[in-house]
């Protein structure tokens, strides 16, 4: 097997990571997996959507690559140019447990997680907080869409008003004309919601692991035991992130998005 002397590499994407690690079985990252003999083990790329247990829907998993033991000779590895994915026609003996890696490239604008109402409630047990984070708060012309946001969040204006102690929202109806006084309230609620979500996340290891690694959400190897961050392989979660409103299709499918701080 071809080997390299370099102990570390920069990586441009998942494919680059796979090729470099499969070429260089002496790379320091292999030591993390504590294999006595890694000669038959290779990284392969995850392809497509996987079942999320918390929503019972197929979505993008947290792991981008994982390790498999493959029955293959060196010439065929060379033909594959050291690259394998789940579509490759290879004889996989078994995958290595807890070898899923989430790969985040340096200086890229990626999302840590895009969270639907179902996934949010599974994590936080709080539908009003979801609504507070996903309401429209900037443009008064958009505020009618908040009827759809609350409906998608399985809550009502009355429940929403009580939760955030904003009784002026209690009597909002379909025919309500929104104005700048509502903007002040919605912006305040959204700011509070973002802060509460981040605080709850940081204070709950289970939520953190779900958010960053997909533990309890996906089956092995589609949760990420390992994180590649700044070209370092680690199990430690980088807690420098912020919470914001994601896309919502006009309020019908609101989402909360978690992104890394620059």
Image: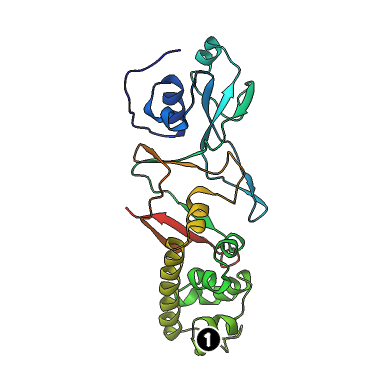
The residue shown at (49%, 26%) is 35
Provide residue 140's location: percent of width, then percent of height. Answer: 46, 77
Report the colour scheme. Answer: rainbow
Provide residue 189's location: percent of width, then percent of height. Answer: 45, 77
Provide residue 54's location: percent of width, then percent of height. Answer: 63, 55
Is residue 138 shown to the viewer in this render? Answer: no
Q: Is residue 213 left or right of residue 232?
A: right
Q: Is residue 181 left or right of residue 77?
A: left
The residue shown at (46%, 62%) is 201
Image quadrant in which you'd find residue 2: top left
Q: Which residue is label 1 attached to?
A: 169
User: What is the residue that sits farthest to the top in this orientation?
Assistant: 75
Q: How many marks?
A: 1
Badge 1: few (under 14), some or many (20 or more) residues near its Cα, within 10 Å? some
**In the picture shown, does residue 174 fall above or below 2?**
below
**In the picture shown, does residue 189 fall above or below 19?**
below
Q: Quadrant of the N terminus?
A: top left
Q: Element under label 1?
A: helix
State the residue in front, 199 or 187. Answer: 199
State the residue in front, 44 or 156. Answer: 44
The residue shown at (56%, 12%) is 73
Is residue 73 shown to the viewer in this render? Answer: yes
Provide residue 13's location: percent of width, then percent of height. Answer: 42, 34
């Amino acid at each position: 097997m071809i080997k390299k002397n370099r102990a570390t590499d920069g990586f441009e994407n998942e494919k680059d990571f796979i090729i470099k690690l499969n070429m260089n079985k002496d790379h320091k990252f292999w030591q993390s997996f504590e294999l006595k003999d890694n000669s038959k083990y290779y990284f392969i790329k995850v392809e497509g959507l996987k079942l999320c247990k918390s929503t019972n829907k197929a979505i993008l998993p947290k792991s981008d690559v994982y390790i498999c033991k493959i029955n293959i000779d060196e010439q065929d590895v060379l033909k594959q140019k050291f690259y394998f994915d789940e579509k490759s026609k290879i004889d996989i003996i078994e995958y290595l447990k807890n070898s899923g890696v989430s790969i985040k490239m340096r200086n890229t604008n990626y999302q840590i997680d895009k969270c639907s109402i179902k996934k949010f409630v599974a994590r936080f047990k709080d539908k009003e907080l979801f609504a507070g984070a996903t309401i429209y708060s900037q443009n008064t012309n958009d505020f009618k869409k908040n009827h759809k946001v609350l409906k998608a969040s399985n809550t009502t204006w009355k429940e929403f008003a009580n939760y955030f102690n904003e009784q002026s929202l209690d009597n909002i109806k379909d025919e309500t004309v929104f104005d700048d006084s509502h903007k002040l309230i919605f912006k305040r609620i959204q700011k509070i919601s973002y802060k509460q979500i981040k605080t709850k996340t940081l204070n709950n290891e289970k939520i953190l692991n779900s958010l960053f690694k997909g533990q309890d959400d996906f089956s092995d190897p589609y949760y990420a035991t390992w994180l590649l961050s700044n070209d370092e392989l680690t199990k430690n979660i980088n807690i420098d992130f912020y919470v914001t409103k994601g896309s919502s299709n006009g309020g019908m499918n609101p989402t909360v998005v978690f992104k890394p701080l620059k």
